[in-house]
Structures are given as C-alpha cells and as structure tokens.
Image: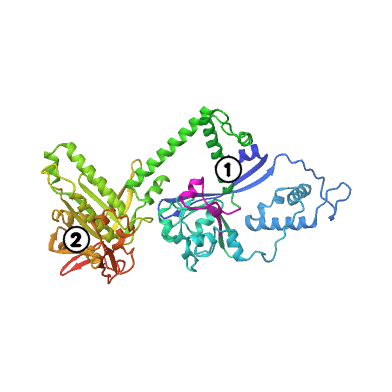
Amino acid sequence: MVVEAAKKFYTMQLQMDLVSMETIEVAEENGTREHVTFCIIAKQIKDPMTIEGPPTFIAQTKKHSERQILKEDVEAVKAKLEQIRTKLGEGALPLMRKKSVISRWRMAAKITLLHRGFVPNYPETLAINPRMFIEIFPYHLIVDKDLKIEQSGIKIQTLMPSIRSRQALLTDYFLIRYPNCVDLTYTNIERFICCPFVLEFRKENMKREWVDRPSLQLKGQMFLLRDSGFFVYIASPIAHCWSDLEHRKLKLSDIPVWDVTRDFLVADLEYRKYIENNVRASLTGSEIPTRRASAWSRRGSLGEDSALRDRIFRLQRELDNERRRSDALYRAFLPKDAIDLVYRDMVSNGEFYQQATALFCDVVQFLPMVARCAPSDVISLLNTLQTTFDNITKIHNLIKVESVGDAYLAVAGVGVSEKREQHAERVANTALGMRITARDLTSPLDGESIQLRFGIHTGSLVTGVLGQKVPRFVAMGETCVLASKLESHGEPGKIHISPTTYQILVNKGFSFEKRGKIELRGYGMLETYFLLKNDILSEDDLLGRSHNNPEVMYINEGRVAGLAYARNNRVYPIAESTSSVSSRPLSGESGSGSLQTK
C-alpha cells in the first residue's frame, strides 16, 4: 500500500526492505505489539535532471551554462553520507549501488541538488530565556530517562502547583490516552515517537475546583533532545467545540496563540451565529445581511433553503435534549469517573480504596407487606422511598450502588473526582435523614409509620463498572458484607454501626447507645453501637431544607471552623476530635471484641 500510494500520489519509487520484526511488551496487561522496522529508499520516477559526466571544477558563482556545485553542498553531502554509513552500514550508501563512475557522479549531483545550496545556521546560544520559553509554550513538559519532570509550562504549573517539585514524576500527574493500551514509560515514548501523544491530567493532583469539571487532556508531540536524552512534550488542550471550554471553565486565552484550535473555535462560533440568524430570519420573515450570507455561501454553508435549515436546527435541538437525558441518566447511577470511561468506550479496571464507608438499609416487615398488600401500594411506597433516598444521598455526596426491592446500598469515600474526605460523617448524616423521612410514610400493611433498619461499616472497598450495554457501578468487599450483617442484626428504627465507624464518629457531635457484644457469623463476638442523633444539626439541615446557611449540612465534616454552632439564638459546643480519620487503624476495637477488615 505504501509503495503504490507513493507511486500514484507522489510519483516516487520506493524500495522497502524488512529490517526486523519483533514482539514487544508495551503494557503490563495485554500490551503485546508487533514491531516491524523497514528500510525505505525513495527516488523520483520522472526526474528531468540530466548530467553529462562528472563536473571538473567547483566555483562559487555560475559560469556560462554549466551546472556548478557549491562547496558548502559538497560538505553537506559528505556529512549526509557519513550519517547513512554510521546508521545503516556501507551497503546502504546510494553511491555504492551504482557501477560506473558516471552513474555515481549523477547520484552525487542529485543528492547535492536536494540541498539547493542551503546550509542551516545553528546558533551557539539561544536568545530566548527560560522564563519566556515556559510562557510561550504553556503546556510543555521536559522529562528525563526516569520520567522525572525537569521543566513544565506555566499553565501546567497553574493547574498542578505540586508539579513544581523536583521529585515530580510524569506518571504521578498524567495518564496516557493515546497511543492506546500503552504504559507511560521512557521506552514506549521512544517506540512511538512518531505518534501524537494524548495525556490526561490526574484530577487528584489538580486544583480543588477541578473536581467537578470534566477531565482535561493535552495533545502534542514528543521530541528527543539527543544531547541530554530528555524528551520534550509540546502540547495544547483538546477542545473540539465551545462547550468543551465552557464545561471546563476555560477561556480562549488558555489555548496557546500558535495553536490552530483557536481558529477552529472562532470559525465554529461564527458559523453557529450564521445558522442562528438564518433560523431567526426564516421564522420572522426578515432578510439576512448580504455580506454575511455571501461569506458563508462561499464557505459552503447550507444554502438558502429555509426548510432544510429548520430541519437541521430541530434535529440539533433534539440531539442536545437526548444528550442531556443521557447525561442525567448516567449521573443517576454512575460516578463521574465512570461516566467519562463509558463515553470513551473504555472498561474500568477497578479501584481499591483503603478506607470507605458503606450504608445498607431495608424496610422492616417488607415481605409480609408484599404478600398481603396491593402491588400498586407497594410500588408506590418503594418509589417514594427511593426518590427520597436518592435526594438525601445527593445532598451528602454519597454514591448509590444499587437497590434491590427494599434494600438500598450507598457508599462514600470512593471515586477520584468525588468527595472522599469525612465519608463516615456524611454516611451517618444520610442515615439520620433517611430515618426522618420514614416517619412521614405509612405502611399499607397496618397504616403505621414504616420502620427502617440500617447498617454502617467503615473499611476497604473494591469498586468498578460492569457491563457495556447497560453499565452498572458495583462495590465489593468485606465492608459491604459487614454493613449488610449489621443491618440484618439490628433493630427496627435503629442505625447499627460497627466499632470502626464508631471510633471515627466519636467526639464529632453525634450521640450513641452502646449495643453490647453480639455474635456475627464469620466475625465472632463484636461490640457494636446504635447511632441515635446528631446533636448539632436540625432535621431540616439533615434533609437539606436549610437555606440560611448553605454550609450547615457539613458541620460534622470539617467545613465550618470554630468550636460552636449557633442555632435559634443558642450556642451548642462542638467537641474537637482528638484523632485523625486517616491515621486511625482499620481494625475497630472495643473491649475484647475486635473487627479486622481486609
């Protein structure tokens, strides 16, 4: 294909010889690639240049009609031939393929003609200083053989302040998205040096305001600095349209001035305004300015058919509506990181979290309710519960995992772009809010208020996304199992928590009741507790109904500084925690009972 394309489009004859074929490992998992190296020699099929014999002199100026060779060209040809001899061997020299002396001189003249008397001038020192360089190339990186970042652009430093450390590694701050299925290593950069590289910022190392924004990717080229062995990456942000900038809260000035993306975005904006004016003119019956209409007609616009423009406008609006519905549906049951993977048709490899909190909840006497009550009453009750629970989990930034029948499972402290700190406090406030909502719902079985059972445990979790057609977020591990056991061994209307969760919540403004030692199958005797109430927050605060202070729902989560919280002209003291959540061991101990989480 390469040979035929060169012959057809470029009138060049290629000679391709296979140098090597090997299988290389570019990734730890399923990262095998076949690497083939060719030696390509090209020559023009139709070359009008004819030279009769070797020249007999070298001159600086043209004399009569004879073809002269500059001295600088001869030196450049010698350097080029020496480079070919060093890299490919003696047999690869073009002159060695010719038999006669005349043929060799013709080949030398052709090589000389390629330079056309041009000898580049390389300055000994650069006129640009380092400060100006990182401002002109705001999205560049320079890494050494250990992938240690030696230099970075001003925009990258602004987005990731910690990258300025001398010990910063490229793999700690970026993920490689292209080439696909390739690990980000120095060897792989050498192998794919001719390919464009797409790197994605790791959100955990970016500024806090980027947590709720879509991921930012850079696209650029890797260049090898032969003197030092460093790689320099010259890149710019990927933005296909204005919405890409708006979602990431970027401006046009954030794109380098030399990047052609600016021109594309400006042309896209002008084109959209033209289409909008056409649609508005077709609806109102007014005329479009002649200059603008003629300009876009020269650019290949949609023409003057108003019916076609209206149809395109309607289809675009329907497409935007469907995209918003799809986004809302994905956000309902998938974390933000998983949504990005689904949109890119990528499969999640799964994540392990050392410490997270799981909440398990179900309805007391649900099976008799299903057996004796009308199906419409049961479904109506579950629909109300699920809707209310979803709203409360959204208020306290929990991730809903699944709901099967009356069972409801939610977790906190997982996900890269999700809020992960104070996960136990947020789960406790969520459970209290769920219990409050249950008082307003009556059971179709006996007409009394329904009662819920809760189980909460803090430990390690494994999360991921299963399925492609209908992706589903799952959470697995001993934490979910123990939360389910605590719920089943709890009491109606009570929030049953493990000793690990109790050690985190104690002295955080919560009231507890000691349950005592109970036996859980597989865990032995365990001393557990009942979570009674939040001494700081009101019921409206737990349900997200407070509008006077938007930070009030996070009072137990470290959002509000100080040691007192005022409500209704009264001051309630807040006890400080004497220990940190991150430094607390994963085993919960109380008395002789202990809990080990893996």
Residue density around tag 1, few if under 14, some if 14–19, many if 20 or more, within 10 Å:
few
Give the percent coordinates (x, y) of residue 594.
18, 66
Magenta region, residue range: 232-257
Q: Is 55 left or right of 138, judged from the image as shown?
A: right
Horizontal side, residue 134 vs residue 382: left or right = right
Mark on residue 568?
A: none
Residue 313 shown left or right of residue 380 in the figure: right
Identify the element where label 2 is drawn: strand
Quadrant for residue 518, please give it: bottom left
- Name the quadrant of the N terminus: top right
Compared to residue 322, the image places residue 436 above or below, namely below
The residue type indicated by label 2 comes to Leu
**Amino acid found under the numbered disc labelled 1:** Ala
| x, y percent for residue 325 | 37, 40
Residue at the far bottom in the pictured view:
578
Mark 2 or mark 1, earlier in chain: 1
Q: How many marks?
A: 2
Q: Is residue 343 covered in magenta?
A: no
Is residue 478 visible in the rendered image? The answer is: no
Q: What residue is pinned by disc 2?
A: 531
**Mark 1 element type:** helix
Out of 374 and 545, give the one closest to the viewer. Answer: 545
Labels 2 and 1 touching (C-beta < 8 A): no
- In the rendered image, residue 245 lying in the magenta stretch gets the answer yes
Q: Residue at x 46, y 33 (%)?
A: 314
What's the distance in space between the residues labelled 2 and 1, CA to CA? 60 Å
Other residues around mark 2 within 10 Å, as few (<14) / some (14–19) / many (≥20):
many
Which mark, by number, is residue 267? 1
Q: Which corner quadrant holds the C terminus?
A: bottom left
Residue 116 location (% of width, % of height): 76, 51
In-image side of 80 versus 528 (left or right): right
